[in-house]
Amino acid sequence: MAERKIKVIIAKPGLDGHDRGAKVIARALVEAGMEVVYLGLQQTPEAIVRAAVEEDADVVGLSILSGAHMANFRKVRELMEAAGLGDRLLTGGGIIPTKDQDKLKGLGVEKVFGPGDDLQEIVEYIRRNARRAAA
Amino acid sequence: MSKTSNAAWKKKYENSGLREADFTSISGRPLQPLYTREDLADFDPETGLGLPGDYPYTRGVHPSMYRGKLWTMRQFAGMGTPDQTNERYRFLLEKGQTGLSVAFDNPTLYGCDSDHALAAGEVGKTGVAVDTLADMERLFAGIPLDRVSTSMTINAPAAWIFAMFLANAEKRGIPFATLRGTLQNDILKEYIAQKEWIFPPEPHLRLITDLMAFCAAEVPQWNTISISGYHIREAGSTAGQELAFTLADGFCYVEHALAAGLDIEDFAPRLSFFFNSHLDFFEEIAKMRAARRIWARAMREKYKAKNPRSWLCRFHVQTAGCSLTAQQPEINIVRTALEALAGVLGGCQSLHTNSMDEALALPSEKAVEIALRTQQIIAFESGVASVIDPLGGSYYVEKLTNGLEEEAERYFRKIDELGGVVKAIELGFFQREITRAAYEYQMALSRKKKFHVGVNDFVNSGQTLEIPLLEIDEAVERDQVAFLQRTRSERDNGAVREALEALKQAAAGGRNLMPPLLECARRYATLGETSAALTAVFGEYREQPFY
């Protein structure tokens, strides 16, 4: 049986229109053989997790350049746990100070990416850490 | 220099052994190793350049340029509550800054109040929160609005933020005629790049035209719109796309205003522009020179403006935020200095230099001071401000300027074929062009065809470098929401409802919306209430997500 493609939800939560990074990553993940569902702008944490459930996503990626990363990652993580998606990878990127990256680790968001991070490195991280669907 | 000697040089060049490197511009433009008179064989400097302050203004919009008046050093700033931002403004004015530039937070940019559900976590984060006239009063407390020019980066709700600004001036007894400044108010590039809109394009364009008509009569020194390429570039476009899409947006605004019956000489002199200055030094300078020439020709030849002031492409420049790196942030000072120098050699009217820490957070006071000092070094130490358009006549710069103009003309034809700017937005044309360019650049970095020092080469491994970052306290949101709720409870709510109702009626009809917006502001209607009243009439806009 062919291996199921890694399925990634990418979303921009809150009121932040900076979608260059989200779109570039979405394309790079598709080129790397993954399936990407890009939800677009102004997504609420509820809508993002609802989509993750419906799509049975392996990975949820949030792109936040507005400074609202702590509130959004915290809320999405909580809702994922509540929806039984605690084993799925939550990651993301944006303008996120090192100090906050450490705090995010406490929420189970092990790694987030920032300006200048290599596309290949991001793709590999997701490939290594995505939950694999039980075959 | 004859053709034969050129050919002889070419032979020597080809035999001399070349570095392994990608000799294209950052936008992917192929570059020759050398430019000579032959490259300008068809170019007539009389008609193509003119003199500074003369048509077609390639060499600058003023006859004396920086000998007459240096560019305005205008640092974009805003964070936290209006009181905190007011403090930053006083700091910048004290350090020798010559104009103010307001950065609003995301909820304000979307026309939402600070207690809106989507605002959670965003209040005061990337700019200052403004909910009502009471916040505008706090923001400019003690600042002489009739003597300092103020730029406001606001688009979708620009008309009702400006109404609050005017209501504040009115309360302080400052005549509208003495107010100087700029509203960004450029909604087209929001659909194209930055994605901060409220309504569909047509009602937004009506609001812009209403504001132009109102200002022509009441606030004559105000720049009603700053037609912006900055965000288009930040979203990943090339230099040529930035130039073409920005000027195409400008033509679209002119056509809308003319269709609404405005006289071109009343509004065109108050149109201004805003360009990015990226890392590719000469390409950026050429882009700015080309912008002046294209705009002047179109305004004179196509739109038949008679007053030379209507032909001028006056612009603000900001160094490229997207060129800054989180890695080795101190070296961003050098990038910003080069980009700022390009802006000055390109003939900008005002300039913002980014701070070294902006790939990590909002800038700290120290970082902002260095950024401002960078401009002062260019202005007062480097000597570049002593001679007008010092690169004019350079074979390379003139050839590049011509090349960028030709690229823009090709895009204008394409946009016309698609049915104009609004249609092209609805078709996703600009968005796709930019997304493709952004991806190609990222791949070029990944494949090391292009370089970013400290990122894909010259990396300091294992270094955890810490510079002090500005933090926005979580208490800002609580304080701002509490202040908003107090304002709501202390105002005359009957009077607010009445003003909002009058606004809805005006929106449903065809009257100029500025007077009813001003009345809403005077009565302390909130930003969000005003947005909701207009949305009830105009509807909302949603973009189909794609990548």
Image (cartoon, coloured by chain):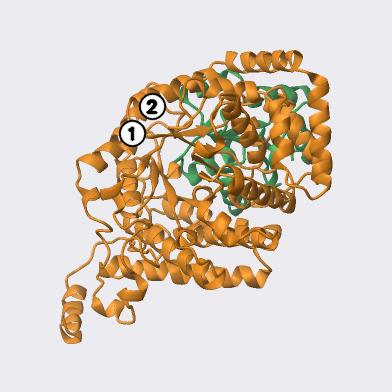
Foreground residue, B162 or B14?
B162
The residue located at (33%, 28%) in the rendering is B369
Chain where mark 2 sits: B
- SS of the residue at dot 2? helix
Q: State left or right for residue B80 relative to residue B421.
A: left
Type of amino acid at the residue the image marks with label 2 = Leu
Which picture quadrant has residue B120? Answer: top right
Mark 1 closeness class: few <14, some 14–19, many ≥20 residues within 10 Å: many
Q: Is residue B452 above or below residue B85?
A: below
Q: Which residue is mark 1?
A: B372
Query: For the image shown, how many numbered marks are present on the structure?
Result: 2
The quarter in which the N terminus of chain B is drawn is bottom left
One can see residue A63 in this view: yes
The chain displayed green equals A
In the rendered structure, find residue B534 and report the number of the disc placed on it: none
Can you tell which quarter of the image residue A129 is in?
top right
Decide: is A83 above or below B425.
above
Q: Is residue B34 above or below residue B105?
A: below
Looking at the image, which residue sits at the far bottom?
B4
Instruction: Give the percent coordinates (x, y) of residue B221.
Output: 50, 44
Give the labeled residue for mark 2: B92
- Looking at the colours in the rendered structure, which chain would you say is drawn in orange? B
Q: The residue marked by circle 1 belongs to what chain?
A: B
Q: Residues within 10 Å of mark 2 (few under 14, many from 20)?
A: many
Q: Position of residue B446 (x, y in %)?
A: 44, 50
